[in-house]
Image (cartoon, rainbow, N blue to C red):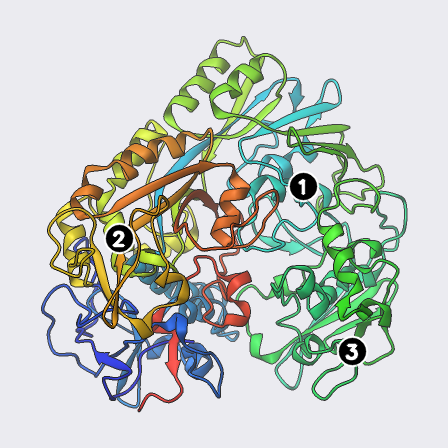
């Protein structure tokens, strides 16, 4: 799955002359390395010195290549990854990492770097040594991310959680970047036993499995999942770090096996119960892992393969089992064992050991058997855990259980019990309000704390009226207030309340962003994403939006995180993409956006790019503006794609409103020859267009159209692991990919020569 190769024919790749002397990065224009369909671009914006080693760029559109050992390509990680150490890595003039194999320089892409970050740790080193190595890989990843700009961070802000002081113990048990309101309220009290929480993000009702069809679930759905899920074997604590859950785990053991695999054996306590009083058993901890590694679950999700047991020994043959005996398929998952009603084990495949965060391999949460299994069962006859035969039953070649799994994913009542501190007693689809009740059977969180608040109402609010709702008493907590005007208003309300209201504040570990669909339309080209970054004055945007209560970051990091501080010490320097129409035009022209709609030289209006017909996907050949006024046109043997950004923004959102001015109507955008067309709607219809599939209450139109979206991302755990989220393997891409990007530096062609 990764890129660069050896000396060969121009039919497949073109030489990119990039200096490979080790050096830090800078604030100047990032080089426009390899945009998949480029015509005659040498990959740099400035004349470059002769390379120390030959570096090759794949000239084909990587989204059209076939993956597999007997197909067009595999990943560079699969080819070289496990044998590479930090000692093998060099940096070019932009601070971009590369390795040399057989005298050829291979740039390291997003997939390689995120995998190396967590899977090349030296288990023989002490914690300090392992941390230093991790931070170095992290620096390389962040530097490349900043260079490719797969999404555009726009503000990183201060959060204010404002609350009615009828809610007690908040200051003693405050929220923080890793411990949100829904985590913290287990320690809080309420004078009337109730709490009403407001959020500007829609609920969809998909609380049992918010990441059903996406790697980017809605924040509110994820919050409800936090409240209704518990009794995990390994948990994230208030500092965001992972630890064993002593409330649940009676004993645990881990051992490295002779073949290099690692086995965790976990014994749970025998007094754990679901919300209906039924007993939690060891088999319940592995049920969802088994289910979502089967073709039955893949059918239920509309073809999205969750690969839940991907790292477990024996996964591939278990995942191939369809209910019928066949060569290369086994009904048992050998790496998971149910040893008794209170004990189970998981063996991690040697290919995933060592792992920087290996304790998370032992993180399992129970689900009531009926949720995903119906009347079926998890069994183990000594060869590994498996699902009873009825789970694979078919009617007219359709898995019967697929419909049950779909229904369970959308279950939002108490017909199936919960394992967490709360249960959903009602979900109003019209008002997008969820009502939750305390689970009296809950054993407690990792500190043994049980909830005291009886009822939670979690409802959708609108930013413009949230403080009026709050002071009227229809809200008790507003989490994550941000933006200058909203923050000023909230703080003024608190100051004038005579102690009736208070707040907790902390720096956000995350940012608001303009997300790109990086595999479709103009935004699949690095130069376009860079140009957009140059067109928007991000620093000014952040200052205006946060009102001074925040700033801007240049890549996916939290500036308070330890690895960021360590990477800065190591000399990491990122491009800030200073606002400049000239810079935007420079990178666009270097990438071939120099035509008009008739195939002539560009002068004014919207730019077009000339692309060979065999380098165009079907969706790109029909790409057009939202209003249909600008379309991809075919002239001779080439297509000309318009530089149109079809942007989907969310309703009643000050972030969206400010983007209209700073992005859509920005002077630099027009000057650069870019046209933005805007659609406003609810969050889940927007998310459905982003993932190009139905999600929650959203329905995908069926034809790719939008390539820009605004929402946010968070780093709510001390575990920073994006392995597989940058994959170029089509088998994982739709479900795991964070940006829908296949970094060309992650492609290794199996037959590089013609």
Question: What is the crowding at mark 1: few (fewer than 14 residues within 10 Å), some, or many (at least 20)?
Answer: many
Please state the horizontal and vertical placement of residue 688, each as a whole percent of the image: 53, 49
> CA separation, marks 2 and 3?
51 Å
Answer with the quarter of the image where residue 223 lies: top right
Above or below 39: residue 183: above
- Secondary structure of the residue carrying tag 2 is loop
Please state the horizontal and vertical placement of residue 720, each as a whole percent of the image: 49, 57
Instruction: Quickly name the residue at label 1.
Output: 205
- Secondary structure of the residue carrying tag 3 is loop
Question: What is the crowding at mark 2: few (fewer than 14 residues within 10 Å), some, or many (at least 20)?
Answer: many
Determine the residue positioned at 75% across, 45% down.
411
Q: Are marks 3 and 1 in contact (CB under 8 Å)?
A: no
Determine the residue positioned at 25% across, 42% down.
536
Please state the horizontal and vertical placement of residue 124, each as a whole percent of the image: 51, 75
Answer with the quarter of the image where residue 406 lies: bottom right
Determine the residue positioned at 84% across, 55% down.
370
Q: Looking at this view, is 452 or 196 the one in front?
A: 196
Disc nearest the viewer among 2 and 3? 2
First of labels 3, 1 by sequence position: 1
First of labels 2, 3 by sequence position: 3
Disc nearest the viewer among 3 and 1? 1
- Secondary structure of the residue carrying tag 1 is loop
> CA separation, marks 2 and 1?
37 Å
Q: Is residue 572 left or right of residue 668?
A: right
Above or below 679: residue 582: below
Q: Quadrant of the C terminus?
A: bottom left
Instruction: Quickly name the residue at label 2.
Output: 643
Disc nearest the viewer among 2 and 1? 2
Instruction: Quickly name the residue at label 3.
Output: 331
Q: Is residue 104 visible?
A: yes
């Amino acid at each position: 799955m990764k890129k660069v190769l050896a000396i060969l024919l121009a039919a497949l790749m073109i030489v990119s002359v990039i200096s490979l002397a080790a050096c830090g990065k800078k604030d100047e224009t990032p080089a426009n390395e390899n945009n998949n369909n480029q015509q005659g671009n040498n990959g740099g914006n400035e004349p470059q010195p002769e390379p120390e080693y030959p570096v090759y760029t794949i000239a084909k559109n990587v989204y059209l290549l076939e993956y597999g050992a007997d197909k067009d390509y595999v990943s560079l990680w699969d080819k070289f990854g496990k044998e590479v150490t930090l000692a093998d890595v060099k940096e070019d003039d932009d601070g971009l990492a590369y390795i040399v194999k057989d005298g050829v320089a291979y740039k390291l892409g997003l997939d390689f770097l995120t995998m190396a970050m967590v899977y090349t740790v030296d288990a023989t080193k002490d914690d300090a040594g392992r941390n230093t190595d991790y931070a170095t890989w992290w620096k390389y990843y962040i530097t490349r991310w900043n260079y490719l700009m797969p999404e555009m961070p726009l503000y990183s802000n201060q959060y204010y959680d404002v609350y009615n002081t009828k809610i007690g113990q908040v200051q003693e048990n405050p929220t923080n970047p890793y411990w949100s309101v829904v985590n913290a309220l287990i320690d809080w009290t309420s004078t009337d036993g109730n709490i009403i929480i407001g959020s500007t993000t829609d609920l969809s009702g998909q609380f049992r499995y918010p990441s059903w069809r996406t790697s980017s679930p809605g924040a509110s759905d994820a919050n409800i999942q936090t409240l209704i899920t518990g009794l995990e074997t390994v948990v994230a604590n208030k500092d965001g770090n992972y630890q064993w859950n002593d409330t649940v785990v009676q004993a645990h053991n881990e051992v490295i096996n002779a073949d290099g695999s690692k086995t965790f054996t976990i014994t749970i306590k025998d007094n754990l119960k679901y919300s209906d009083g039924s007993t939690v058993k060891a088999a319940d901890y592995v049920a969802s892992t088994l289910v979502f590694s089967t073709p039955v679950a893949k059918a239920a999700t509309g073809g999205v393969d969750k690969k839940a047991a991907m790292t477990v020994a024996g996964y591939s043959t278990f995942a191939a089992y369809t209910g019928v005996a066949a060569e290369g398929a086994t009904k048992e998952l050998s790496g998971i064992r149910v040893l008794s009603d209170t004990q189970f084990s998981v063996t991690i495949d040697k290919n995933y050991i060592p792992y920087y965060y290996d304790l998370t391999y032992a993180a399992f949460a129970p689900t009531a058997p009926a949720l995903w299994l119906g009347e079926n069962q998890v069994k183990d006859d000594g060869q590994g855990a498996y699902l009873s035969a009825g789970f694979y039953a078919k009617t007219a070649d359709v898995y019967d259980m697929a419909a049950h799994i779909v229904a369970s994913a959308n279950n939002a009542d108490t017909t199936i019990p919960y394992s967490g501190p709360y249960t959903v007693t009602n979900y109003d689809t019209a008002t997008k309000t969820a009502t939750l009740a305390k689970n009296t059977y809950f054993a407690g969180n990792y500190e043994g704390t049980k909830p005291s608040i009886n009822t939670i109402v979690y409802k959708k609010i609108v930013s413009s009226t949230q403080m009026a709702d709050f002071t009227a008493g229809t809200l008790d907590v507003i989490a994550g207030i941000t933006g200058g005007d909203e923050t000023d208003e909230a703080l003024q309300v608190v100051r004038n309340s005579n102690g009736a209201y208070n707040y907790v504040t902390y720096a956000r570990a995350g940012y608001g962003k303009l997300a790109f669909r990086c595999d479709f339309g103009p935004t699949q080209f690095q130069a376009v994403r860079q140009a957009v970054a140059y067109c928007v004055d991000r620093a000014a945007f952040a200052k205006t939006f946060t009102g001074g209560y925040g700033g801007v970051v240049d890549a996916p990091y939290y500036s308070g995180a330890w690895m960021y501080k360590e990477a800065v010490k190591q000399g990491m320097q990122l491009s800030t993409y200073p606002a400049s129409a000239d810079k935007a035009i420079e990178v666009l022209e270097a990438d071939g956006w120099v035509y008009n709609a008739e195939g002539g030289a560009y002068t004014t209006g919207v730019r077009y790019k000339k692309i060979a017909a065999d380098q165009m996907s079907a969706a790109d050949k029909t790409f057009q503006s939202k209003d249909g006024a600008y379309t991809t046109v075919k002239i001779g043997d080439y297509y000309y794609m318009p530089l149109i950004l079809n942007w989907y923004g969310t309703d009643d959102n000050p972030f969206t409103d400010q983007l209209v001015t700073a992005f859509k109507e920005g002077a630099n955008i027009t000057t650069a020859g870019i046209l933005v067309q805007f659609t406003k709607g609810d969050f889940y219809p927007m998310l459905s267009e982003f993932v190009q599939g139905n999600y929650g209450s959203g329905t995908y139109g069926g034809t790719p159209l939008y390539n820009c979206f605004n929402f946010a991302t968070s780093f709510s755990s001390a575990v920073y692991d994006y392995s597989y989220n940058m994959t170029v393997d089509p088998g994982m891409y739709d479900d795991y990919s964070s940006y829908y990007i296949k970094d060309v530096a992650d492609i290794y062609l199996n037959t590089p020569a013609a």
